[in-house]
Image (cartoon, helix red, strand yellow):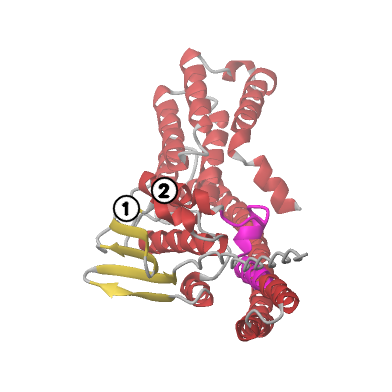
Amino acid sequence: MLASLIERLFDRKLTPVRVSLLAAIAVGYLLLLAPPDKLPDPSGWALLSGALAAAWFSPRSPLASALAQAAMLATGELLGIDNMIPLKVLASFALLELAMRRTGWVLPAGATVLSAVYFLIGLTNPLRSPAEIVFQTAVVVVGPLVLGAYIGGMNARARQAEERAAEQERLRRTESQMVRVAERTAIARELHDLVAHHVASIVLRTGVARHLLGESDEQMRQVLDDVHATGSGALTDLRRLVAVLRDPEATDTAGGDLVDPAELPAAVAAVIDRCRQVGLRIDATVDPALAGLDAVKALAVLRLVQEGLANVAKHAGSSARVWLTAELARDGVRLDIADDGEGDPSGTVSAQHSGSAQHSGHGLIGMRERVELLGGTLRVGPEGTGWALSARLPAPEPEPKPEPKPEPEPEPEPMASVP
Protein backbone atom coordinates (compact mmCIF):
# COMPACT_ATOMS: atom_id res chain seq x y z
CA MET A 1 0.00 0.00 0.00
CA LEU A 2 2.72 2.47 1.05
CA ALA A 3 4.99 1.43 -1.81
CA SER A 4 2.19 1.92 -4.30
CA LEU A 5 1.42 5.38 -2.88
CA ILE A 6 5.07 6.46 -3.00
CA GLU A 7 5.44 5.14 -6.54
CA ARG A 8 2.43 7.18 -7.64
CA LEU A 9 3.74 10.32 -5.90
CA PHE A 10 7.07 10.10 -7.73
CA ASP A 11 5.60 9.06 -11.06
CA ARG A 12 6.92 10.96 -14.07
CA LYS A 13 3.41 12.03 -14.98
CA LEU A 14 3.21 13.99 -11.72
CA THR A 15 6.42 15.94 -12.36
CA PRO A 16 4.52 19.22 -12.99
CA VAL A 17 2.71 18.77 -9.67
CA ARG A 18 5.94 18.16 -7.73
CA VAL A 19 7.77 21.08 -9.34
CA SER A 20 4.81 23.39 -8.77
CA LEU A 21 4.66 22.32 -5.13
CA LEU A 22 8.39 22.95 -4.69
CA ALA A 23 8.07 26.35 -6.34
CA ALA A 24 5.17 27.29 -4.08
CA ILE A 25 7.11 26.23 -0.97
CA ALA A 26 10.25 28.11 -2.04
CA VAL A 27 8.44 31.34 -2.94
CA GLY A 28 6.23 31.11 0.15
CA TYR A 29 9.26 30.68 2.39
CA LEU A 30 11.09 33.63 0.84
CA LEU A 31 8.10 35.97 0.94
CA LEU A 32 6.49 34.95 4.22
CA LEU A 33 9.13 33.41 6.50
CA ALA A 34 12.48 34.84 5.46
CA PRO A 35 13.63 38.12 7.03
CA PRO A 36 13.14 41.14 4.76
CA ASP A 37 16.87 41.68 4.49
CA LYS A 38 17.32 38.09 3.27
CA LEU A 39 15.13 38.40 0.19
CA PRO A 40 17.02 37.47 -2.98
CA ASP A 41 17.94 40.07 -5.55
CA PRO A 42 17.09 39.59 -9.27
CA SER A 43 20.08 37.30 -9.74
CA GLY A 44 18.85 35.16 -6.83
CA TRP A 45 15.38 34.88 -8.34
CA ALA A 46 16.99 33.92 -11.66
CA LEU A 47 18.98 31.15 -9.97
CA LEU A 48 15.84 29.89 -8.23
CA SER A 49 14.02 29.80 -11.57
CA GLY A 50 16.91 27.86 -13.11
CA ALA A 51 16.90 25.39 -10.22
CA LEU A 52 13.15 24.81 -10.63
CA ALA A 53 13.65 24.25 -14.37
CA ALA A 54 16.36 21.68 -13.61
CA ALA A 55 13.98 19.95 -11.18
CA TRP A 56 11.48 19.62 -14.04
CA PHE A 57 13.90 17.30 -15.91
CA SER A 58 14.92 15.35 -12.82
CA PRO A 59 12.80 12.22 -13.52
CA ARG A 60 14.21 11.83 -17.06
CA SER A 61 17.81 12.91 -16.40
CA PRO A 62 18.42 12.73 -12.65
CA LEU A 63 22.22 12.96 -12.88
CA ALA A 64 22.11 16.00 -15.15
CA SER A 65 19.55 17.61 -12.83
CA ALA A 66 21.72 16.97 -9.76
CA LEU A 67 24.78 18.44 -11.48
CA ALA A 68 22.74 21.47 -12.54
CA GLN A 69 21.57 22.00 -8.95
CA ALA A 70 25.17 21.79 -7.76
CA ALA A 71 26.12 24.42 -10.36
CA MET A 72 23.29 26.67 -9.13
CA LEU A 73 24.56 26.36 -5.55
CA ALA A 74 28.13 27.19 -6.57
CA THR A 75 26.94 30.16 -8.64
CA GLY A 76 24.85 31.45 -5.74
CA GLU A 77 27.86 31.30 -3.45
CA LEU A 78 30.02 33.16 -5.96
CA LEU A 79 27.36 35.87 -6.34
CA GLY A 80 27.10 36.25 -2.58
CA ILE A 81 23.41 35.39 -2.26
CA ASP A 82 22.51 35.40 1.41
CA ASN A 83 19.51 33.06 1.51
CA MET A 84 20.25 29.85 -0.40
CA ILE A 85 17.95 27.53 1.56
CA PRO A 86 15.55 27.02 -1.41
CA LEU A 87 18.51 26.15 -3.65
CA LYS A 88 19.80 23.64 -1.09
CA VAL A 89 16.35 22.04 -0.78
CA LEU A 90 16.12 21.67 -4.55
CA ALA A 91 19.62 20.18 -4.65
CA SER A 92 18.69 17.60 -1.99
CA PHE A 93 15.50 16.82 -3.91
CA ALA A 94 17.56 16.23 -7.08
CA LEU A 95 19.83 13.85 -5.16
CA LEU A 96 16.74 12.04 -3.86
CA GLU A 97 15.45 11.56 -7.42
CA LEU A 98 18.89 10.35 -8.52
CA ALA A 99 19.01 7.69 -5.80
CA MET A 100 15.45 6.61 -6.62
CA ARG A 101 15.85 6.19 -10.36
CA ARG A 102 19.49 5.27 -10.97
CA THR A 103 22.10 2.80 -9.71
CA GLY A 104 25.76 2.22 -10.42
CA TRP A 105 28.42 4.87 -10.91
CA VAL A 106 25.97 7.77 -11.36
CA LEU A 107 25.10 7.74 -7.65
CA PRO A 108 28.62 8.34 -6.29
CA ALA A 109 29.28 10.79 -9.14
CA GLY A 110 26.30 12.98 -8.27
CA ALA A 111 26.88 12.68 -4.53
CA THR A 112 30.58 13.55 -4.88
CA VAL A 113 29.94 16.69 -6.93
CA LEU A 114 27.23 17.94 -4.58
CA SER A 115 29.34 17.12 -1.50
CA ALA A 116 32.26 19.06 -2.96
CA VAL A 117 30.04 22.11 -3.53
CA TYR A 118 28.65 21.94 0.02
CA PHE A 119 32.15 21.52 1.44
CA LEU A 120 33.47 24.53 -0.48
CA ILE A 121 30.50 26.62 0.64
CA GLY A 122 31.23 25.63 4.24
CA LEU A 123 34.88 26.64 3.91
CA THR A 124 33.85 30.18 2.93
CA ASN A 125 32.26 30.61 6.37
CA PRO A 126 35.07 31.22 8.87
CA LEU A 127 32.72 30.65 11.81
CA ARG A 128 32.29 26.95 11.02
CA SER A 129 34.75 24.30 12.08
CA PRO A 130 35.77 21.48 9.73
CA ALA A 131 33.78 19.01 11.84
CA GLU A 132 30.62 21.10 11.45
CA ILE A 133 31.18 21.35 7.70
CA VAL A 134 31.65 17.57 7.35
CA PHE A 135 28.58 16.83 9.50
CA GLN A 136 26.34 19.26 7.60
CA THR A 137 27.55 17.92 4.26
CA ALA A 138 26.92 14.34 5.35
CA VAL A 139 23.38 15.18 6.49
CA VAL A 140 22.30 17.03 3.35
CA VAL A 141 23.91 14.44 1.03
CA VAL A 142 23.64 11.07 2.80
CA GLY A 143 20.06 11.67 3.96
CA PRO A 144 18.57 12.09 0.46
CA LEU A 145 20.71 9.21 -0.83
CA VAL A 146 19.46 6.77 1.83
CA LEU A 147 15.84 7.87 1.52
CA GLY A 148 15.95 7.74 -2.27
CA ALA A 149 17.55 4.30 -2.28
CA TYR A 150 14.87 3.04 0.13
CA ILE A 151 12.01 4.42 -1.98
CA GLY A 152 13.61 3.09 -5.16
CA GLY A 153 13.97 -0.35 -3.59
CA MET A 154 10.31 -0.33 -2.54
CA ASN A 155 9.25 0.63 -6.05
CA ALA A 156 11.47 -2.07 -7.57
CA ARG A 157 10.04 -4.74 -5.26
CA ALA A 158 6.50 -3.61 -6.10
CA ARG A 159 7.23 -3.85 -9.83
CA GLN A 160 8.82 -7.27 -9.37
CA ALA A 161 5.75 -8.47 -7.48
CA GLU A 162 3.50 -7.24 -10.30
CA GLU A 163 5.72 -8.93 -12.90
CA ARG A 164 5.68 -12.20 -10.94
CA ALA A 165 1.90 -12.04 -10.67
CA ALA A 166 1.61 -11.38 -14.41
CA GLU A 167 4.03 -14.22 -15.18
CA GLN A 168 2.08 -16.60 -12.95
CA GLU A 169 -1.12 -15.61 -14.73
CA ARG A 170 0.54 -16.26 -18.11
CA LEU A 171 1.78 -19.64 -16.89
CA ARG A 172 -1.67 -20.50 -15.60
CA ARG A 173 -3.23 -19.64 -18.96
CA THR A 174 -0.54 -21.57 -20.82
CA GLU A 175 -1.03 -24.64 -18.64
CA SER A 176 -4.79 -24.42 -19.13
CA GLN A 177 -4.34 -24.20 -22.89
CA MET A 178 -1.89 -27.12 -22.86
CA VAL A 179 -4.40 -29.22 -20.93
CA ARG A 180 -7.11 -28.36 -23.44
CA VAL A 181 -4.83 -29.18 -26.36
CA ALA A 182 -3.83 -32.49 -24.76
CA GLU A 183 -7.48 -33.41 -24.17
CA ARG A 184 -8.44 -32.54 -27.72
CA THR A 185 -5.47 -34.45 -29.11
CA ALA A 186 -6.39 -37.51 -27.03
CA ILE A 187 -9.98 -37.35 -28.26
CA ALA A 188 -8.77 -36.96 -31.84
CA ARG A 189 -6.46 -39.95 -31.46
CA GLU A 190 -9.26 -42.12 -30.07
CA LEU A 191 -11.59 -41.08 -32.88
CA HIS A 192 -8.95 -41.81 -35.49
CA ASP A 193 -7.62 -45.06 -34.06
CA LEU A 194 -10.92 -46.62 -32.98
CA VAL A 195 -14.06 -45.10 -34.43
CA ALA A 196 -12.66 -44.11 -37.82
CA HIS A 197 -10.97 -47.49 -38.16
CA HIS A 198 -14.21 -49.37 -37.57
CA VAL A 199 -16.19 -47.09 -39.88
CA ALA A 200 -13.58 -47.55 -42.60
CA SER A 201 -13.82 -51.32 -42.12
CA ILE A 202 -17.61 -51.16 -42.47
CA VAL A 203 -17.31 -49.13 -45.66
CA LEU A 204 -14.75 -51.54 -47.09
CA ARG A 205 -16.78 -54.66 -46.26
CA THR A 206 -19.94 -53.07 -47.64
CA GLY A 207 -18.15 -52.31 -50.89
CA VAL A 208 -16.93 -55.91 -51.13
CA ALA A 209 -20.41 -57.27 -50.43
CA ARG A 210 -21.87 -54.97 -53.05
CA HIS A 211 -19.34 -56.20 -55.58
CA LEU A 212 -19.95 -59.86 -54.80
CA LEU A 213 -23.69 -59.45 -54.89
CA GLY A 214 -23.64 -58.25 -58.48
CA GLU A 215 -27.01 -57.66 -60.10
CA SER A 216 -28.81 -60.63 -58.59
CA ASP A 217 -30.82 -58.62 -56.05
CA GLU A 218 -31.55 -55.01 -56.97
CA GLN A 219 -33.18 -54.11 -53.66
CA MET A 220 -30.29 -55.51 -51.62
CA ARG A 221 -27.85 -53.66 -53.86
CA GLN A 222 -29.67 -50.40 -53.22
CA VAL A 223 -29.48 -51.02 -49.48
CA LEU A 224 -25.75 -51.71 -49.70
CA ASP A 225 -25.23 -48.60 -51.83
CA ASP A 226 -26.99 -46.54 -49.18
CA VAL A 227 -24.91 -48.09 -46.38
CA HIS A 228 -21.71 -47.52 -48.36
CA ALA A 229 -22.56 -43.86 -49.08
CA THR A 230 -23.61 -43.22 -45.48
CA GLY A 231 -20.44 -44.84 -44.13
CA SER A 232 -18.24 -42.88 -46.53
CA GLY A 233 -19.91 -39.65 -45.46
CA ALA A 234 -19.49 -40.55 -41.80
CA LEU A 235 -15.82 -41.34 -42.38
CA THR A 236 -15.30 -37.96 -44.07
CA ASP A 237 -17.03 -36.20 -41.17
CA LEU A 238 -14.88 -38.08 -38.68
CA ARG A 239 -11.71 -37.05 -40.47
CA ARG A 240 -12.91 -33.46 -40.52
CA LEU A 241 -13.70 -33.62 -36.80
CA VAL A 242 -10.28 -35.11 -36.03
CA ALA A 243 -8.61 -32.34 -38.03
CA VAL A 244 -10.53 -29.67 -36.13
CA LEU A 245 -9.73 -31.25 -32.76
CA ARG A 246 -6.05 -31.37 -33.64
CA ASP A 247 -6.13 -27.70 -34.64
CA PRO A 248 -7.76 -25.52 -31.94
CA GLU A 249 -7.07 -22.46 -34.06
CA ALA A 250 -9.60 -23.72 -36.56
CA THR A 251 -12.38 -23.43 -33.97
CA ASP A 252 -11.06 -20.76 -31.61
CA THR A 253 -10.64 -18.07 -34.26
CA ALA A 254 -12.54 -18.92 -37.35
CA GLY A 255 -15.67 -19.99 -35.61
CA GLY A 256 -15.01 -23.67 -36.28
CA ASP A 257 -15.06 -23.39 -40.09
CA LEU A 258 -12.54 -25.29 -42.16
CA VAL A 259 -10.80 -23.66 -45.07
CA ASP A 260 -12.91 -23.23 -48.17
CA PRO A 261 -10.89 -25.19 -50.77
CA ALA A 262 -11.76 -22.64 -53.46
CA GLU A 263 -10.05 -19.96 -51.35
CA LEU A 264 -6.92 -21.99 -50.52
CA PRO A 265 -4.61 -20.42 -53.18
CA ALA A 266 -5.66 -16.94 -52.05
CA ALA A 267 -5.20 -17.87 -48.37
CA VAL A 268 -1.68 -19.21 -49.04
CA ALA A 269 -0.85 -16.05 -51.02
CA ALA A 270 -2.09 -13.90 -48.12
CA VAL A 271 0.21 -15.72 -45.68
CA ILE A 272 3.15 -15.23 -48.05
CA ASP A 273 2.38 -11.51 -48.44
CA ARG A 274 2.24 -11.00 -44.67
CA CYS A 275 5.63 -12.66 -44.25
CA ARG A 276 7.10 -10.59 -47.07
CA GLN A 277 5.97 -7.40 -45.37
CA VAL A 278 8.14 -8.16 -42.35
CA GLY A 279 11.29 -9.07 -44.30
CA LEU A 280 11.19 -12.62 -45.65
CA ARG A 281 12.26 -12.79 -49.30
CA ILE A 282 9.96 -15.46 -50.68
CA ASP A 283 9.98 -16.94 -54.19
CA ALA A 284 6.62 -18.73 -54.28
CA THR A 285 4.83 -20.93 -56.77
CA VAL A 286 1.24 -21.71 -55.79
CA ASP A 287 -0.77 -24.00 -58.05
CA PRO A 288 -4.35 -22.74 -58.61
CA ALA A 289 -5.38 -26.41 -58.88
CA LEU A 290 -5.10 -26.60 -55.07
CA ALA A 291 -8.64 -25.25 -55.05
CA GLY A 292 -9.71 -28.78 -55.97
CA LEU A 293 -8.71 -30.25 -52.59
CA ASP A 294 -11.19 -31.21 -49.92
CA ALA A 295 -11.58 -29.02 -46.83
CA VAL A 296 -9.40 -31.20 -44.58
CA LYS A 297 -6.44 -31.32 -46.96
CA ALA A 298 -6.85 -27.60 -47.70
CA LEU A 299 -6.59 -26.81 -44.00
CA ALA A 300 -3.53 -29.06 -43.71
CA VAL A 301 -1.76 -27.30 -46.60
CA LEU A 302 -2.52 -23.87 -45.16
CA ARG A 303 -1.27 -24.81 -41.69
CA LEU A 304 1.89 -26.37 -43.13
CA VAL A 305 2.66 -23.16 -45.02
CA GLN A 306 2.05 -21.05 -41.92
CA GLU A 307 4.16 -23.20 -39.61
CA GLY A 308 6.89 -23.64 -42.21
CA LEU A 309 7.32 -19.91 -42.80
CA ALA A 310 7.13 -19.19 -39.07
CA ASN A 311 9.93 -21.70 -38.44
CA VAL A 312 12.05 -20.13 -41.20
CA ALA A 313 11.70 -16.70 -39.63
CA LYS A 314 12.38 -18.06 -36.15
CA HIS A 315 15.52 -20.02 -36.98
CA ALA A 316 16.93 -18.41 -40.13
CA GLY A 317 15.90 -14.79 -39.45
CA SER A 318 13.39 -12.35 -40.86
CA SER A 319 15.44 -11.47 -43.96
CA ALA A 320 16.11 -15.04 -45.13
CA ARG A 321 15.43 -16.06 -48.70
CA VAL A 322 12.74 -18.72 -49.01
CA TRP A 323 11.65 -20.93 -51.89
CA LEU A 324 8.09 -22.22 -51.63
CA THR A 325 6.29 -24.55 -54.02
CA ALA A 326 2.74 -25.81 -53.49
CA GLU A 327 1.22 -27.80 -56.32
CA LEU A 328 -1.29 -30.51 -57.05
CA ALA A 329 0.32 -33.29 -59.09
CA ARG A 330 -1.02 -36.63 -60.26
CA ASP A 331 0.29 -38.42 -57.20
CA GLY A 332 -1.05 -35.82 -54.77
CA VAL A 333 -0.16 -32.53 -53.12
CA ARG A 334 3.49 -31.47 -53.06
CA LEU A 335 4.60 -28.76 -50.65
CA ASP A 336 8.27 -27.76 -50.44
CA ILE A 337 9.67 -24.92 -48.32
CA ALA A 338 13.43 -24.26 -48.18
CA ASP A 339 15.55 -21.35 -46.97
CA ASP A 340 19.16 -20.25 -47.33
CA GLY A 341 19.70 -19.89 -43.56
CA GLU A 342 21.25 -16.45 -44.02
CA GLY A 343 18.61 -14.16 -42.54
CA ASP A 344 18.84 -11.66 -39.71
CA PRO A 345 18.55 -13.61 -36.44
CA SER A 346 17.60 -10.43 -34.55
CA GLY A 347 14.33 -10.14 -36.45
CA THR A 348 11.53 -12.66 -36.23
CA VAL A 349 8.15 -13.03 -37.80
CA SER A 350 5.49 -13.30 -35.16
CA ALA A 351 2.70 -15.82 -35.26
CA GLN A 352 0.30 -13.03 -36.10
CA HIS A 353 2.25 -12.19 -39.28
CA SER A 354 2.58 -15.78 -40.42
CA GLY A 355 -0.94 -16.61 -39.37
CA SER A 356 0.04 -19.64 -37.32
CA ALA A 357 -1.54 -20.44 -34.01
CA GLN A 358 0.34 -18.74 -31.21
CA HIS A 359 -0.74 -21.08 -28.44
CA SER A 360 -1.34 -24.33 -30.29
CA GLY A 361 1.92 -25.86 -29.05
CA HIS A 362 1.99 -28.30 -32.00
CA GLY A 363 5.13 -27.35 -33.91
CA LEU A 364 6.85 -30.13 -35.80
CA ILE A 365 4.98 -32.89 -33.96
CA GLY A 366 1.63 -31.35 -34.83
CA MET A 367 2.57 -30.98 -38.50
CA ARG A 368 3.75 -34.57 -38.71
CA GLU A 369 0.59 -35.90 -37.02
CA ARG A 370 -1.58 -33.84 -39.36
CA VAL A 371 0.18 -35.17 -42.46
CA GLU A 372 0.22 -38.79 -41.30
CA LEU A 373 -3.46 -38.56 -40.39
CA LEU A 374 -4.20 -37.81 -44.04
CA GLY A 375 -1.98 -40.64 -45.26
CA GLY A 376 0.92 -38.41 -46.30
CA THR A 377 4.59 -38.00 -45.43
CA LEU A 378 6.61 -35.14 -43.97
CA ARG A 379 10.36 -34.61 -44.12
CA VAL A 380 12.01 -31.79 -42.21
CA GLY A 381 15.74 -31.26 -41.83
CA PRO A 382 18.85 -29.31 -42.81
CA GLU A 383 19.58 -28.76 -46.46
CA GLY A 384 22.72 -26.89 -47.52
CA THR A 385 23.13 -23.82 -45.34
CA GLY A 386 19.45 -23.68 -44.47
CA TRP A 387 16.46 -25.83 -43.63
CA ALA A 388 13.89 -27.62 -45.77
CA LEU A 389 10.36 -28.91 -45.30
CA SER A 390 8.85 -31.36 -47.76
CA ALA A 391 5.28 -32.63 -47.38
CA ARG A 392 3.37 -35.05 -49.56
CA LEU A 393 -0.37 -35.62 -49.31
CA PRO A 394 -2.32 -38.20 -51.31
CA ALA A 395 -4.38 -37.07 -54.24
CA PRO A 396 -8.01 -36.24 -53.52
CA GLU A 397 -10.33 -39.16 -53.96
CA PRO A 398 -12.50 -38.83 -57.04
CA GLU A 399 -16.17 -38.52 -56.36
CA PRO A 400 -17.87 -41.88 -56.92
CA LYS A 401 -19.97 -41.88 -60.03
CA PRO A 402 -23.31 -43.63 -59.74
CA GLU A 403 -23.30 -46.87 -61.65
CA PRO A 404 -25.84 -46.87 -64.46
CA LYS A 405 -28.73 -49.11 -63.72
CA PRO A 406 -29.44 -51.66 -66.46
CA GLU A 407 -32.51 -50.78 -68.39
CA PRO A 408 -35.19 -53.47 -68.25
CA GLU A 409 -35.54 -55.46 -71.44
CA PRO A 410 -38.76 -54.70 -73.29
CA GLU A 411 -41.36 -57.38 -72.92
CA PRO A 412 -42.24 -59.18 -76.19
CA GLU A 413 -45.46 -58.07 -77.69
CA PRO A 414 -48.21 -60.70 -77.52
CA MET A 415 -48.77 -62.50 -80.79
CA ALA A 416 -51.96 -61.76 -82.54
CA SER A 417 -54.42 -64.62 -82.52
CA VAL A 418 -55.04 -66.34 -85.83
CA PRO A 419 -58.69 -66.80 -86.60
Q: Position of residue 114 (x, y in %)?
A: 44, 42
10 Å crowding of disc 2: few (<14), some (14-19), many (20+): some
Question: Is 30 situated left or right of 64 in this image?
Answer: right
Which amino acid type is shown beneath numbered disc 2? Ala
Q: Which residue is mark 1?
A: 284
Question: Would residue 255 be counted in the magenta stretch?
Answer: yes
Q: Determine the secondary structure under disc 2.
A: helix
Number of numbered discs on residues: 2
Q: Position of residue 9 (x, y in %)?
A: 67, 41
View extreme (top): residue: 42
Question: Residue at image x 52%, y 23%?
Answer: 48
Magenta residues, start to end: 232-259
Label 2 or label 1, whichever comes before in sequence order: 2
**Residue 302 in view here:** yes
In the displayed structure, 385 sits above or below 313; it is below
| Contact between labelled residues 1 and 2, with CB atoms less than 8 Å apart | yes
Which amino acid type is shown beneath numbered disc 1? Ala
Of the pair 404 and 321, the residue shown nearer to us? 404
Question: Is 137 situated left or right of 213 in this image?
Answer: left
The disc label shown at residue 317, or none:
none
Q: Main secondary structure of the magenta part?
A: helix
Question: Residue at image x 34%, y 63%?
Answer: 337
Question: Would residue 347 be counted in the magenta stretch?
Answer: no
Q: Position of residue 411 (x, y in %)?
A: 70, 67
Where on the picture, by quarter, is residue 324? bottom left
